[in-house]
Image: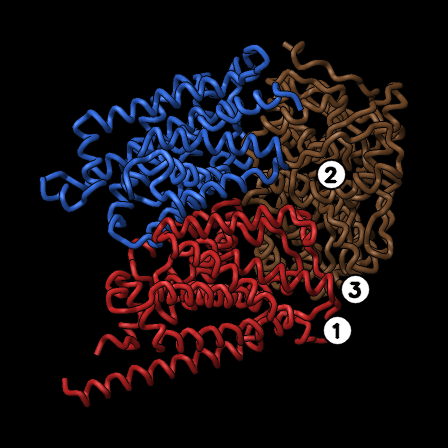
Chain colours: A blue, B brown, C red
Amino acid sequence: MTFDVYLNVAVAGILTGLVYGLMALGLSVIFGVVRVINFAHGEMMSIAMFLAVVLFSAFHLDPLIMLLPIAAVMFVFGYVLQAGLINPFMTRPEHSQFLLLVAVGIIIVNVLLIVFGPDARTVQTSYAYDSFQLGPVLVDASKAYAGVAAIVFAAGLFAFFRFSLVGKAIRACADNYTGALVVGLNVNRLYALSFALGTACVGAAGSMMTLIVDVTPNLGPTYTLLAFVIVITGGLGSMAGALLGGVLIGLTEALAGLLFTPSAKSMFAFAILVLVLLFRPQGLFSKRAT
Amino acid sequence: MTRIRINRRQLLAGSAVGAATLAAPALVRAQNGPLKVGVLLPRSGFEAAIGQDCQRGVDIAPPIFKSLGLPELTIMNGDTASNVDVAREHAEKLISDGAQLLVGAFDSGQTTAIAQVAEQKGIPLVINIAGAPAITEQGYKFVFRNFPTAITITADGFANQKEIFSIVGVEPKTAVFMRVNDTYGTAMSKGVAALMPKFNMPYKILEEISYDPAARDLSVEVAKAKATNAEVLLVVGRLNDALLMTRELIKQRWTPEAILSMGPGWYEDQYFKTLGKMSDGPISFVPWFDPNKKLAQTLEAAFVKAYPGSNMNTNQVFTFEALLVAADAYKRAGSTDPKALVDAIRKTDITDNVSVGPGIAFNAKGQNDKVKDSAIQNRGGKAVTIAPKEAANAKPEWPMKPYQNRA
Amino acid sequence: MTAVAIGRAADGVRRRNAVLLVVLLAALLAAPWLVNDYLLTVMIVILYSAFTGQAWNIMMGFAGQLSLGHALYAGLGAYVSAVLFTKFGIDPWLGFLVSVPVAALSGAIIGFLAFRFGVSGVYFAILTIAFAEFARIGFDHLSLVNAAAGLFLPVAQYGHNDLLRLRGDPTMFYYVILAATVVAFALCRFLIGSRIGYYWLAIREDEQAARSAGIDTFRCKMYAVTISAAITSFAGVFYAFFYNNLFPEQVFGIGRSIEMILGPVIGGVGTLFGPILGSFLLTGLAETLDSALAAAGLDVPGAKEVFYGVCLLIVIVALPDGVWPPLARRLGLDKDKR
């Protein structure tokens, strides 16, 4: 195989990885900061995807434009979900949290099945089939747009957590629960807020994902697991970590698919996960020890 | 525990048939009411789309049976939830609720689980779709399959390919084989490897690329296939990956001379609806309906009327035929006794049917080894039959029109 | 209360527990004569899930290690015994003797890696998922087991029940899984009352404190994961010979692992009756919903699952410790209440 093939595959892998990273950003907040084992992550994203598809087919609104409104809707959904259902579980054991979200996931998948039916839905944008030719490399336009959006979104989140007061308060909460209580932070509200923020990221990601994959009610579970792999690999609560983790997994899977058999490529992602868990549990791109 | 699920349409059809029964008592004399048929399909879970697609074949059947003078069926719907355990449980449940015959279940694993229950209870099972050869190799006495096995699909596929090659006068020398790594894809891979030399195919497979059934992205797979520079793309997949693959072919600007698919996905309604102009060209080698047969035309008309804007496909055809086998056997048996039903099914000889081939009859193993596959090509938003000759209604188009020139 | 009174109260609890056990067992033994085949199949599913729940409970309920990849051990048990049977004609019980060490060894390897490198809590849970997924993808490519095409066991005619080869009617399978559940229950009861059981509880409550008290926590946790994996492997053997087909996706998938933990979590983690009660409630709920929706004429795919999810949610929210602990207190079956 020629060098060009490797180059093309590597570029495709990186772009796919950025999209994965975008999808995992929300979990990085929910699991990394709020410490909720959100096993309904992919399912939540499929809600956002259906929203985007409905908006597109009804009003012809491009998912790239609808990214923020959908994020806002999902923000409200996340806030209500956390304050109404999940908050009492913040102090409950992990398996209890896990099962709560599994139940939420079952409900989401099947409500979507009843409402939208089992068929795959899609958004047919004018640029759906476009690709750019850069020398020997063909770049998928939709993925490139999604990748850029992922970077912008991650930078925004990073700035929020780094510079805004609320962001700092949320981090304080995550670092030291008792300390946050002592200095008088409204911990419950902050938890709801950051969970909502995470869900908003999921909303934005879902909107973008419709450019790349068709949505079905059963799409969620595979993405849930993938998001956990990425977030743990990249490092909990690190925005750059989630993106880089996504890129690493995307690139690994792409090259593994090229060099070995593609149907086994996920094995390599899981291998990376196992190695990270054993040797660098704080994640590859995070300085903070867990 | 007696409960029967009937939806409104079937209820209406039921009363209509009731009236017909009064008018033609000779046909259904000595029968004890309608035959209770338990239909098991994966209508929720990961196979929900295809299970519900099969269900349409059940829903449009009653008025057609009436017009054929066949006895009434009471349909009891069961959902396998795309799960082997649930399939088995619900087979037991349907039987305990009074089902006298079972039909199902699209998926080979679920069908195997149901077959065991049927066999052990002595209730006949007519399989609509399931390709694993093992199912009819168990020596079962109550299990019948009116659907080709993976081996037959491969053999017929190769035969039809050679027919097409001779019609268009082209013999491709190289192919790349992309297949999904699931039950069906793996069985087909074995079939292809075993039968290629026997059929003396003109092309050589340069590389076999298998991918994950839950694939979210096929860019690498398609890049790898494109790099082989093969003339034709041979695929065995599902709807999800057919869509992903087509988009990648377009974006990576590669139109093979032909896409030859030996499985589902590429002819399904969703494929046409989602891809529009880009859906034209691929050729599928699948069990299909014979557009020249009278019953096929009747069924298609009923289908289009019930689901405007959709195209009938394999899923409805074989689910309908499974019910047809049941109704026909019931008519001849004149009794709901399972033994009598099984004897009648074994003597099935339906020539007025929907699928391609001489008709429906079962061999000693309960397999219809006469059912033949077609080659169908996507053309203007629907599939036309291009081979075998006796079932064809169009000439093949070769090579495929490049994706880039379809604006 | 005086010591005598306490002793008497404890005797009472013990007696009531014994009565409950005897009544339950008698009812279960008589079940095949009382219910039809459909309900018997449902009972098999319930006991299967009670059995795997019991095995999972050793790790999570007793030793506090959250495993979300238990499908791995059942899957290994299933595939090892099925391959030995189909390719070498080795009977399932002999195959079981091979499956146990295979599953136990894989449990031990995962445990060793996790506990040596200090992987705990959610991280441990994710690690167990990763290994189960590893196995799923690996078996999807293993031609010895027919890869993704699936391994089909030859189904003999049901002329007579052959317990040795696990070939027979549902009644035979029912008694097999009932016996297995009884054995697992007895084993758990023995373990929880033994020295290792107390060590496990100490680790579950506070691992550091346990270590400072001189408990070899590494070794204890290794016992938990190994024993749990070994027991779970029998569930796989049963599954293989009951359903007669194995697909990596169906056997090792994460859905399977989640199914295994539903029963014990709903019933009550760390209790002996919890996994059994939880399995009864959940499977009973699913089947009742099915019948109820059908009776209501509601034939909408997905509706049953929505109701199921909502019920699950309500139980998890309302009863944080599961159904059994409050029920046991109400019935006076709880040793803690004197």
B14 or C106: nearer the viewer: C106
Which residue is tagged 1? C159
**Chain under label 3?**
B
Mark 1, secondary structure of its residue? loop
Q: What is the distance, in whole Å, between disc 1 and disc 3 at their CAs?
A: 17 Å
Q: Position of residue B243 (x, y in %)?
A: 61, 27
Mark 2 or mark 3, earlier in chain: 2
Q: Nearer the viewer, mark 2 or mark 3?
A: 2
Viewed as shown, does residue B6 lie left or right of B31?
left
Tell me the CA gap for discs 1 and 2: 36 Å
Q: Which mark is residue B339?
A: 3
Residue placed under numbered mark 2 in the picture: B317
Which of these two is toward me, C303 or A274?
A: A274
Query: Marks 2 and 3: CB-CB under 8 Å?
Result: no
Find numbered disc 3 in the image and state the secondary structure of the residue it sits on: helix
Q: Chain of mark 1?
A: C
Q: Nearer the viewer, residue A201 or C93?
A: C93
Q: Quadrant of the N terminus of chain C?
A: bottom left
| Residue kind at label 2, given as amino acid type | Val
Whether labels 1 and 2 share one chain: no
